[in-house]
Image: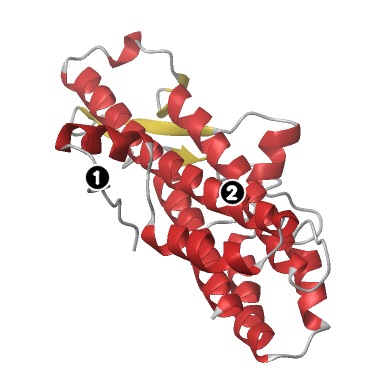
């Protein structure tokens, strides 16, 4: 659970601005600042602090994507109701039109990049507790698999499960395929769109529930859900769970 905690030392109007500008997440902030920092070196702490910063960034981007998705859907619905849909910059043909939501695409790309960076910092943070410096989740698992203690036993299995669920988004899937984060980081822009389908029988247009990831891309794996807001929610939820649970298990 994420909660913004107001600082009681400030007047209410200052608190309101502080909540918007300085998000405070009890679950992560308390363990990083009050539990971990006194127990690790400065060189180790920089990785835990980076995780703390990046997971807040992912939460902000996730919320921004939800807001933008709703705004674009409202905008397109209005264009349909006002019968000006053909004046938009659309791709496709009379069977199905595609609308590219620029700002939502930009934030989705940012979330994918920040998600991978967060996972890499997390790997270094946990790895540093065992005298190692793994820079990705696979290398961290290799380090942990060579250790035998109760803390590792509590961490390793949830990590394996989360890693599999993140395949295809911020972690590359099986050989010969690409994660969408890798594609947009090195070669392509993110291919997302709203679909607008003419229904000749009902004489109306049918708008997609939200922005969709192009599931026909030849290099990406199949997803259980191609809605951008659902993929974003999954990435946020899995990363937050990894960090909160593993940090707690490591320092309990």
Image quadrant containing the N terminus: bottom left
On the image, the x and y values in percent for residue 228 come to 45, 44
Residue at image x 27%, y 32%?
Answer: 17
Q: Circle 1 sits in a helix, a strand or a loop, which is it?
A: loop
- Residue 59: x and y in percent read 43, 47
Q: Categorize mark 1 by other alpha carbons within 10 Å: few (<14), some (14-19), many (20+).
A: few
Location of mark 2 (residue): 115
- Residue pointed to by mark 1: 9
Horizontal side of 227 relative to 216 (left or right) equals left
Q: Where is residue 74 in the image (x, y as percent from the top left)?
A: 23, 28
Of 237 and 48, the residue lying toward us? 48
Q: Distance between the residues labelled 1 and 2?
A: 33 Å
Vertical comparison of 252 with 115: above or below:
below
Does the image show residue 206? yes
Q: Between 23 and 57, which is closer to the camera in this rendering?
A: 23
Q: Which of 65 and 119 is in front in this view?
A: 119
């Amino acid at each position: 659970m994420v909660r913004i905690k107001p600082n009681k030392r400030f007047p209410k109007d200052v608190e309101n601005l502080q909540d918007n500008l300085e998000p405070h997440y009890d679950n992560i902030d308390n363990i990083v600042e009050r539990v971990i920092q006194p127990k690790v070196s400065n060189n180790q702490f920089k990785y835990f602090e980076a995780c703390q910063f990046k997971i807040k960034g992912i939460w902000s981007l996730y919320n921004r994507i939800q807001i933008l998705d709703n705004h674009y859907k409202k905008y397109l619905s209005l264009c349909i109701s006002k019968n000006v849909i053909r004046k938009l910059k659309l791709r496709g043909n009379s069977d199905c039109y595609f609308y590219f939501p620029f700002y939502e695409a930009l934030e989705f790309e940012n979330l994918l990049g920040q998600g991978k960076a967060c996972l890499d910092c997390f790997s270094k943070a946990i790895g540093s507790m065992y005298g190692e410096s793994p820079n990705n989740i696979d290398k961290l698992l290799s380090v942990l698999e060579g250790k035998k203690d109760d803390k590792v036993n509590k961490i390793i299995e949830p990590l394996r499960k989360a890693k599999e669920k993140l395949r295809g988004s911020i972690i590359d899937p099986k050989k010969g395929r690409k994660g969408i984060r890798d594609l947009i980081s090195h070669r392509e822009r993110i291919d997302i769109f709203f679909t607008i389908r003419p229904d000749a029988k009902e004489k109306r247009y049918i708008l997609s529930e939200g922005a969709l990831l192009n599931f026909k891309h030849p290099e990406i794996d199949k997803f259980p859900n191609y809605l951008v807001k659902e993929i974003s929610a999954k990435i946020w939820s899995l990363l937050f769970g990894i960090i909160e649970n593993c940090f707690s298990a490591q320092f309990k």
